[in-house]
Image: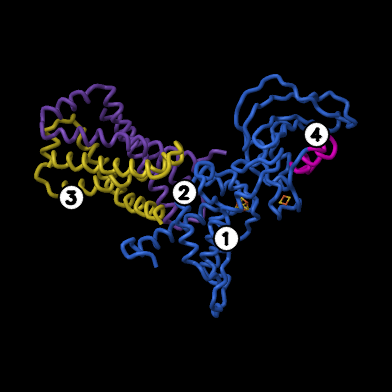
Chain colours: A yellow, B purple, C blue
């Protein structure tokens, strides 16, 4: 039951992430044309609700997707299983969420 | 015994792990935007060649993980009855990788 | 006529499903053996010998014959060179699935594998199947393979109510089931699968392939139970597709497992956890 849920959530977050990653790659290529500066990044993002919503969704989906994927790798390649791993991955997800939302708040 | 699908899996997994490790740093640096000077310091540091190369590598990793993910989604949610699909996804991945590698190199 | 294994170089390592010291052997081709070696080329056959995990490679010279199978080679060794060699076979025609071994690094059904197709420069390396405990020599303990099959509930549950509507060969579900029913339970896919090696709780390609045929069988009365069972393991398939690559009857368990994943995905979304289990 738990595994089925993690699998389902992992695929759902992947479906959300796929178009966002494509968009992000486009933004990266556009943004780095002539060097990065804080002013340039902020000029693009500040006060834009659309950026806020899109990148907010991005942060949420990534904070779900990365820990589940990492959990699978640690189980299979490191042999770390059980509650300790699940707690660690939960904390990793929260860390990503906190840092991601902080970054979002900083540039908006 | 290793064939296309297995290598596609490996690239997908390794790029995923690398991205999961990178993500907290990425968010952390962006979070510095509140103090513009701090972010600009980081961005200046990021101006040197090695860091640029590493960043180009990250762009490629993201593109790679996206393609690998699309392969998984196509295999699982598409109704392909044939293993040729994975070859197609792999070819698509290589094409995308080459394209982004080229662009990233051009901007580095 | 026993060929001597010469210990010229040894190192620790893993080949097939066994670990231990690997002895490079050089078969003396010139030995007098009762065969006319000038007309009959000798095969240089390395076979894994040992109990459980401990063992080593031993080398045998076996005459090469037209249309010879790998099982013929193993049988020759046992009948004419070393009667203590343990291996398993039954039907010799590719139906029972008991003769699987690792041949030159890849799991195969030995009774239907021609030496001429797989030998490299007259050399064969034969070891027990991977991912299963070795009993002795080439015989593995198949119990874990079937126990996981049982635990995955991959068995037919007759529908309590008679199925009135006849099952037509052309209907999509029947076609999906038909695509997977020729499994001979050889465990070749199980031996080839990295997910099996990496996850002690992964049922393996064959069991999940069987589960998918049942999910598509209208006469089966426990679709939901099958999907519940599938939900605990099918996501561990990483679509390496090694199983499809090696299956001797050309099944594609990865496709079957993808079907299970789709249904598990749908079923999980259809019943959110806050609604409790039905
Ligand atoms: S699916 Fe193919 S390889 Fe696997 S046990 Fe059945 S016949 Fe053997
Ligand atoms: S001996 Fe029966 S399948 Fe090979």
Circle 1 chain: C
Q: Give the range drawn in magenta.
A: C66-84
| Residue C62 disc label | 4
Q: Do the residues labelled 2 and 3 touch (CB within 8 Å)?
A: no
Residue indicated by mark 3: A53
Residue at 52% from the left image edge and 60% from the top image edge: C212
User: Is A40 drawn above or below residue A7 in the view shown?
Assistant: above
Q: Do labels 2 and 4 share a chain?
A: yes
Q: Which residue lies furthest to the bottom in this view?
A: C164
Say what secondary structure mark 2 lies in.
helix
- Output the chain of dot 4: C
On residue C179, the disc is 1
Q: How far apart are marks 4 and 3 (CA)?
A: 72 Å
Q: How far apart are marks 1 and 4 (CA)?
A: 39 Å
Q: Is residue A106 left or right of residue C187?
A: left
Q: In which quarter of the image is the C terminus of chain C?
A: bottom left
Earlier sequence position, callout 2 versus callout 4: 4
**Residue nearest the viewer, comparing B20 with C21:** C21
Q: Nearer the viewer, residue C136 or C30?
A: C136
Which one is nearer the viewer's eye here, B104 or C173? Answer: C173
Are the residues flagged by discs 4 and 3 in contact, CB closer than 8 Å? no
Identify the residue at the far top of this view.
Answer: C8
**The N terminus of chain C - image quarter:** top right
Subunit of label 2? C
Query: Are dots 1 and 3 on a single chain?
Result: no
- The answer as to whether the residues below labels 4 and 3 share one chain is no
> Secondary structure under badge 1?
loop
In the image, the residue with mark 2 has its CB under 8 Å from the nearest atom of ligand 1: no
Disc with the residue nearer the chain's start (1 vs 2): 1
Q: Is mark 4 within 8 Å of ligand 2?
A: no
């Amino acid at each position: 039951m738990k595994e089925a849920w993690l699998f389902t959530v992992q695929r759902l977050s992947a479906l959300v992430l796929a178009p966002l990653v494509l968009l992000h790659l486009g933004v990266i290529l556009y943004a780095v044309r002539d060097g990065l500066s804080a002013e340039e990044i902020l000029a693009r993002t500040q006060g834009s609700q659309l950026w806020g919503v899109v990148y907010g969704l991005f942060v949420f989906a990534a904070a779900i997707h990365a820990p589940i994927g990492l959990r699978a790798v640690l189980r299979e390649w490191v042999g770390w299983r059980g509650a300790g791993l699940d707690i660690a991955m939960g904390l990793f997800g929260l860390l990503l969420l906190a840092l991601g939302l902080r970054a979002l708040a900083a540039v908006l | 015994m290793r064939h296309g699908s297995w290598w596609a899996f490996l690239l997908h997994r390794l790029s995923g792990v690398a991205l999961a490790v990178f993500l907290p740093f990425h968010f952390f640096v962006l979070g510095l935007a509140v103090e513009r000077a701090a972010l600009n310091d980081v961005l200046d540091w990021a101006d040197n060649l090695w860091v640029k190369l590493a960043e180009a590598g990250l762009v490629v990793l993201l593109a790679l993980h996206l393609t690998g993910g699309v392969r998984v989604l196509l295999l699982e949610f598409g109704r392909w009855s044939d293993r040729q699909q994975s070859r197609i996804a792999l070819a698509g991945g290589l094409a995308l990788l080459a394209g982004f590698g080229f662009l990233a190199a051009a901007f580095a | 006529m026993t060929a001597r294994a010469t210990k010229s170089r040894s190192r620790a390592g893993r080949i097939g499903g066994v670990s231990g010291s690997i002895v490079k052997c050089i078969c003396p081709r010139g030995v007098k053996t009762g065969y006319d070696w000038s007309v009959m080329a000798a095969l240089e056959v390395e076979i894994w010998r040992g109990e459980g995990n401990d063992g080593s490679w031993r080398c045998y010279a076996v005459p090469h014959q037209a249309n010879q199978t790998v099982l013929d080679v193993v049988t020759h060794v046992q009948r004419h060179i070393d009667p203590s060699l343990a291996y398993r076979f039954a039907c010799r025609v590719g139906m029972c699935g008991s003769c699987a071994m690792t041949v030159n690094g890849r799991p195969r059904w030995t009774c239907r594998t021609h030496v001429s197709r797989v030998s490299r420069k007259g050399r064969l390396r034969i070891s027990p199947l991977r991912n299963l405990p070795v009993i002795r020599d080439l015989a593995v303990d198949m119990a874990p393979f079937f126990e996981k099959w049982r635990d995955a509930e991959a068995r037919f549950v007759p529908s309590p109510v008679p199925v009135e509507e006849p099952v037509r060969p052309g209907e999509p579900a029947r076609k999906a089931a038909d695509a997977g029913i020729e499994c001979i339970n050889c465990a070749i896919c199980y031996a080839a699968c990295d997910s099996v090696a990496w996850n002690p709780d992964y049922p393996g390609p064959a069991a999940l392939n069987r589960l998918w045929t049942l999910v598509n069988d209208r006469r089966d009365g426990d679709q939901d139970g099958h999907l519940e069972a599938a939900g605990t393991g099918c996501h561990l398939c990483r679509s390496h597709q090694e199983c499809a690559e090696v299956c001797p009857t050309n099944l594609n368990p990865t496709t079957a497992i993808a079907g299970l994943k789709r249904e598990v995905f749908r079923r999980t979304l259809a019943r959110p956890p806050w609604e409790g289990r039905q």
